[in-house]
Structure formats: structure tokens, C-alpha cells
Image: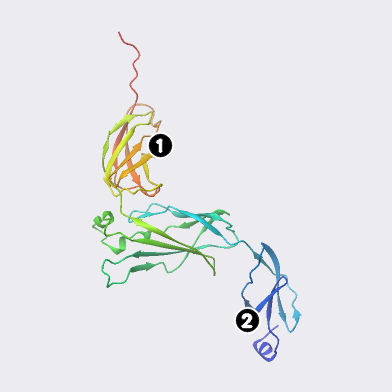
Amino acid sequence: GLSHSTVESDSSTLYCMFGEVEVIGVLADDMTVSCVAPAYGIEATVVVGIKFNGKLSESRASFGFVPEPIIDFISPESLPSIDISTVSIDVHGSNFDSRVPVFCHFQRILPSKDDSMQNRRVANEEPVKAIYLNNSLVQCPVQSWLTLQDFFSLHNQDWAKNATLLEGAILEMSLTTEQDWIHSHTIPYLPSETVISLFPRCAPRSGGTKIRVTGENFAERDSLACRFGSMNAELVRFISSKEIECTTPQFNHFGSGAHVVEVQIANNGADFSSSTGFFEFYDHLIIEDAN
């Protein structure tokens, strides 16, 4: 075995060997040598050994070099300021490996409106381990504290609809392995959507009717979604922050006859508003005879 006295008294350098590649090692204690893995041009599994005084140790240990993960996009691309129902932020890309854990770091930032004050920040003390699904998708579990609620009143939630107050509020998400930085991404917080009225308020079960939804804080995003009960609208068209157009889906639930459902909006396609309107589906009028 090696000891600090042995290494210090010998002029030879202590090396870690990754296959044929050697890097300088540091003796941490009599049982441990620490070293930084070298760059390796290809995906490979190599034998790891110790080289000291020109002699290579016998080793049964191996080390894997894997491709660096590549991040393509993250969803959802925004979050509501309150009432987050999303259970994970999905990270899409390539080269994820179940042998290399990915960790998610979150930091909420609410810019101050007073230039003399620093940004108000709250960071998660412990990173969250991502859930590996396959080599192109990992999920960062979303914690309930990721809302902005603790910056404001717990009782009066009018702040959650105030676009001016929330301007510039972001969630910074960074992805790392145990030691290496992979990617960082900025996710904006959006003010809560509000549904005020629907026109018309009823339509046939067959779907395809265009419904004007008026409200507040609608966002012009590809992810903008409109939901009738449990079914998403066939098409959503953004008109303004106060108006969108939703095309009703075909409604085949609950047999026949009229049925009332809630209509909800989600700017990010995932976190549907607690503010709702009510819409009625009815059967098509069928004329069987006329005289």
C-alpha cells in the first residue's frame, strides 16, 4: 500500500491510469487516490489502475467514458406564478445515461422595482436528482415551493394576476452531473390567466365550434391551451392578452343529452388556471320528418 510518507519521500509522480492514458493522482489517504478523469475522444470502458515509481498496479476496476449530454429543449417553457400543477420539468435531448445521474438546481429570481435594491433570490439548498426515462428524456421533479407565493401575501393573491409586478420574474434551472455543469435554462413566470366570459356558451357535441374566451393575462405562445372538461380544444388562436379563440373538441362523454363542463386556459399547456368558465355541450337537432 501507499502512504503519504512513501509518496513524499519518492521523487516519482503518482499517476492514475485510464487505459493507456495517465493523469496525475493525489493520495487522499492510505486507501484512496484521487484523480481527474482525462478527456477521451470516444465512448469506451477502460481499466483504471495506479502507477507509482514506474510500476503499474494490478486492477480489476473499470471506468466508463460516455458522450456528453446534449439539451434540445425544456417543457413547459413557462410557469404560473401560483398554483403550479406541473409535477416535472421535462428535459429533452440526447446522450442521457442511466449510469450518470443528472441533478437539477433551481433558483427563483424576482427583480426589484427599486434600482437601489438587489434582486430578491431564493435558492434550493439541495439539488434534486432527475428521473431518467430514456437516453433522450430526463425529468426534474417540481417542488411545491417553486411558486412565487412566499415573496407575497399568502392570503391576498391579487399579486398573481399583476403582470407589471411579475415582469422579469424567472426560474433559473441548471443541470449538472455530480461534478460537471451541463446546461442552464431560464423559465419565465407568467401572471395567472383569468377566464371572464365565453361566447357562445353552448355548442353541439360534434365539435368544431369556435368559442371566444375573454379574460386576462393570455400569452401569445405555441403552448397556449384551452381545455373543455378533460379534453383539449382542437385549435387555439391568440387574439390578445384579453381574448383567445378555442375550437371545441368532439364531446362523446356521458352518453347523450346536454352536459356542462369547465373551460380552463393554460399559457404553458400544462398548468391550467383555477379561474374557469362554464360551457354546455348538447346533441345536434335531428329533423326526422316535415309536412
User: Quarter-wise, where is residue 22 in the image?
Assistant: bottom right
Foreground: disc 1 or disc 2: 1
Element type at mark 1:
loop
Q: Relative to 264, say whether 68 is above or below.
A: below
User: Quarter-wise, where is residue 169 in the image?
Assistant: bottom left
**Residue at image mark 1:** 234
Left or right, 25 with reference to 155: right
Q: How many numbered callouts? A: 2
Element type at mark 2:
strand
**Residue at image mark 2:** 26
Q: Can the viewer see residue 146?
A: yes
Q: Specify few, some or many for label 2: CA neighbours under 10 Å numbering under 14, 14-19, or 20 or more.
A: some
Q: Amino acid at mark 2?
A: Val
The picture places residue 152, in percent across and down from the top left corner, at: 27, 62
In-front residue for pair 202/3: 202
Q: How is the image coloured?
A: rainbow
Q: Can the viewer see residue 233?
A: no
Q: Amino acid at mark 1?
A: Glu
Left or right, 139 with reference to 153: right
